Image (cartoon, helix red, strand yellow):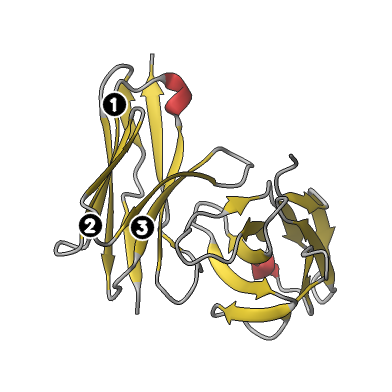
Amino acid sequence: SQKIEQNSEALNIQEGKTATLTCNYTNYSPAYLQWYRQDPGRGPVFLLLIRENEKEKRKERLKVTFDTTLKQSLFHITASQPADSATYLCALSNNAGNMLTFGGGTRLMVKP
Amino acid sequence: DAGVTQSPTHLIKTRGQQVTLRCSPKSGHDTVSWYQQALGQGPQFIFQYYEEEERQRGNFPDRFSGHQFPNYSSELNVNALLLGDSALYLCASSPLDYSVGEQYFGPGTRLTVT
């Protein structure tokens, strides 16, 4: 069965450093891989989308890589700020539509 | 421009009861998806509606049903509630465009089954 793994342990980093979050998947060939941010008690907010034929995508301080051979995506936040503290969710979808399959999320804590 | 709205915000029900949750999509969106998010986990896809028809369905029992109205708003119904149905129920909307993957989520309805 399809499996998407994100580090369930919280990631604690110092303000100004680069945060790197990992998303690994098995038994899946996604057309799109997406990253969402979720704050407590709120719905996920879309951050970035990367397609299967793209290696890297950037948006401001965010960068996503997508390695379909390793079946892995890395999500980077450079110059991290305490306001970046949240849970980050990886989600995959295929060409059949835009049903999303989510990982369990990784909680990021940026300390001042 | 209003984003995705959901009602109610919170709901407490007793085991065996039935519940209806409501969602209005973002303006210009015609596709609505519902997700269940248990505490500490990622959202799980329940089903998706387009043109008032269920297009896709996740691995949820028939107790979970839905409806989409001509104005694209949607309802999620859950019958014979179980304790395990306690979760945050999220509605997401998107345009039906396979080149667009991202979805816009509402704030969710927190359902507690006692």
Left or right of residue B59, residue B110 in this image: right
Which picture quadrant has residue B103?
bottom right
Query: What residue is shown with label 3?
Result: A33
At label 3, the amino acid type is Leu
Q: Nearer the viewer, mark 3 or mark 2?
A: 3
Q: Earlier in the sequence, mark 3 or mark 2?
A: 3
Residue at 85% in and 74% down: B17
Residue flagged by tag 1: what amino acid is it? Thr
Vertical comparison of B51 with A108: above or below:
below
* Mark carried by residue B16: none
Chain letter of disc 1?
A: A
Q: Secondary structure at mark 1?
A: loop
Which element carries disc 2, helix, strand or loop?
Answer: strand
Residue A72 is tagged as 2
Q: Quadrant of residue A58?
A: top left
Q: Quadrant of the N terminus of chain B?
A: top right
In front of the other: B95 or B49: B95
